[in-house]
Image (cartoon, grey):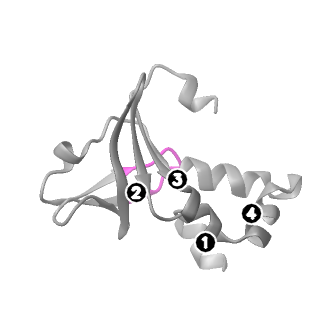
Amino acid sequence: AETLRGEGPFTVFAPTDDAFRRLGDQEFQRLMQPRNRDELLALLAYHVVPERVTSEDVGARVSRVEASSGYRVTLDGRVGLRINDQLVVMPDIEASNGVIQGVNAVLAPPTMVASR
């Protein structure tokens, strides 16, 4: 939340409600436990790119950008807009300090994927 209060610009790849439901209640509750705070913060930071990225910016190509977590994400605009192979289902929602891209999945940073 502190990061997003800044001037930006930012792009938030925000999971939809359906994406959170697919994550599962047990996993959601696990992430909410105080002992997993660092993991939750890493997960959230992986959804934020510290620059403004719209569908038009990506165009019909593949590019890689760095998320606030320090990991790189892949953006693909060849068939709709995708981030790491997940579809942006609500593109280009303007915000006062950037843009929101509604994505159909909760994105897992590489460290979380490796530990599962």
Dot 2: element: strand
Eye-nearest disc, 1 or 2: 1
Eye-nearest disc, 4 or 3: 4
**Type of the residue with mark 1:** Arg
Residue 109 coordinates in the image, percent (x, y): 54, 63
Identify the residue position indicated by label 1 in the image: 22
Q: Quadrant of the C terminus?
A: bottom right
Eye-nearest disc, 4 or 1: 1
Which of 116/96 is in front?
A: 96
Identify the residue position indicated by label 2 in the image: 72
Tell me the residue at 87%/52% (across/down): 34
Is label 3 in contact with label 2 (beta carbons under 8 Å)? no
In screen coordinates, is 71 left or right of 55?
A: right
Dot 1: element: helix
Query: In terms of sequence position, does the residue under pointer 4 or pointer 3 come before the other?
Result: 4
Identify the residue position indicated by label 4 in the image: 28
**Type of the residue with mark 2:** Arg
Tell me the residue at 86%/57% (across/down): 33
Whole-Å distance between the Cαs marked 3 and 2?
9 Å
Whole-Å distance between the Cαs marked 1 and 3?
18 Å
Number of other residues with Cα within 10 Å of mark 4, as a class: few under 14, some 14 to 19, many 20 or more = some
